[in-house]
Image (spheres, grey):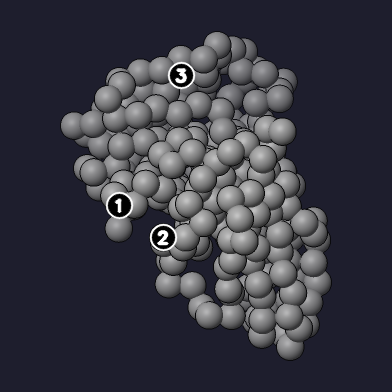
C-alpha cells in the first residue's frame, strides 16, 4: 500500500516568516495530494490540493508543489499569522479503479507561529 | 448545505453495549468514508462507500459494521468494542475522485 512520510513533526516560525512542510510518497500510481489543517478539537479542514498532472498550485498565502519524479510534495505558507498555528497533514490517494479511494495521511506537522 | 454533519458529538459506551454513529451530507456526493483518529495521530481509513456500496474495507474488525442506507447517510454500528477503540471517528464525503470533506467527528470513549 501507499506510505506517506512527513517532515518536520514540529515547526516553529516567527510571525510573518514563511513555513515549509515536506512529504514523500511511495506509490507512483498515487495521483492526488491534499493538505489538511486541523486545529485542536476540530475537524481536518482541506486547505489546498494538487493533482499529479500539475506541478504547482497557489491560493493566496498557501502554495503546494509536486515533483512526481522524486515522489515529493511540499506545502508553503508565506507571511504566517497566529491563526496558522495548527497541525497540518499531507495525504496521498492511490486510485484503485473503483472510483472512490481513501487517503493515506502523513503523521502531521505541528506548526507554531511565534508572535 | 455545504457541510458534513455527525451525531453524536460524544459517546461513552461499555464493552457490552451496542451503539451507532451517524453521518449525513447533502452536497450530492456519491462517496462516503469512515476514518478513525487517535490522539496526536493522523486519520486512518476504515471504510469507503461508493454509490451506496461498500468498496473498501481496510481489514476493520467485525465489531465495526458500516451501513449506507441512502446516498446522503452513512452509519457505523458498534458492538462489543474494546477500550483501545476509543478515538475520534470521522466521516467524510466526496465526489468520486474529488476532494474529501470531513465532518466534526464523534469522540468515542469505551469503558
The verdict on a common chain for dots 2 and 1 is no
Mark 1 packing: few (<14 Cα in 10 Å), some, or many (20+)? few
Disc sitting over residue A96 in the figure? 1
**Residue B53, disc:** none
User: Which quadrant of the figure has residue B111?
Assistant: bottom right
**Residue at (58%, 74%) from the top-left corner?**
B64
Residue A101 shown left or right of residue A2 in the figure: right
- The foreground one among B32 and A1 is B32
Question: Do discs 1 and 3 share a chain?
Answer: yes
Residue under the image location 63 percent in, 49 percent down:
B72
Numbered label attached to residue B55:
2
Residue at image mark 3: A63
Coordinates of residue A105 in the picture (x, y in percent): 45, 48
Chain designation of label 2: B
- Mark nearest the camera among 1 and 3 is 1
Calculate the distance from the C-alpha at mark 2 to the C-alpha at mark 1. 10 Å
Instruction: From the viewer's perspective, tell me whether residue A100 is left or right of residue A40.
Output: left
The reply to whether callout 2 and callout 1 are in contact (CB within 8 Å) is yes
Farthest front residue in view: B70
Q: Which of marks 3 and 2 is in front?
A: 2
Amino acid at each position: 500500500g501507499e506510505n506517506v512520510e512527513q517532515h518536520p513533526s514540529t515547526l516553529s516560525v516567527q510571525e510573518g516568516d514563511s513555513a515549509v512542510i515536506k512529504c514523500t510518497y511511495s506509490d507512483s500510481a498515487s495521483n492526488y495530494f491534499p493538505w489538511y489543517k486541523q486545529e485542536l478539537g476540530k475537524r481536518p479542514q482541506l486547505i489546498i490540493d494538487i493533482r499529479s498532472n500539475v506541478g504547482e498550485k497557489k491560493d493566496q498565502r498557501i502554495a503546494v508543489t509536486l515533483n512526481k519524479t522524486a515522489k515529493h510534495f511540499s506545502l508553503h505558507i508565506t507571511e504566517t499569522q497566529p491563526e496558522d498555528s495548527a497541525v497540518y497533514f499531507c495525504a496521498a490517494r492511490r486510485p484503485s479503479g473503483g472510483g472512490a479511494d481513501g487517503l493515506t495521511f502523513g503523521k502531521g506537522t505541528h506548526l507554531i507561529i511565534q508572535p | 448545505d455545504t457541510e458534513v454533519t455527525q451525531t453524536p458529538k460524544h459517546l461513552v459506551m461499555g464493552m457490552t453495549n451496542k451503539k451507532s454513529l451517524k453521518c449525513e451530507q447533502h452536497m450530492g456526493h456519491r462517496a462516503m468514508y469512515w476514518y478513525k483518529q487517535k490522539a496526536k495521530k493522523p486519520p486512518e481509513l476504515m471504510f469507503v462507500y461508493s454509490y451506496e456500496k461498500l468498496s473498501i474495507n481496510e481489514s476493520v474488525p467485525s465489531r465495526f459494521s458500516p451501513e449506507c442506507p441512502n446516498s446522503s447517510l452513512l452509519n457505523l454500528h458498534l458492538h462489543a468494542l474494546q477500550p483501545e477503540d476509543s478515538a475520534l471517528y470521522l466521516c467524510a464525503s466526496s465526489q468520486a475522485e474529488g476532494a474529501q470533506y470531513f465532518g466534526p467527528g464523534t469522540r468515542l470513549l469505551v469503558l
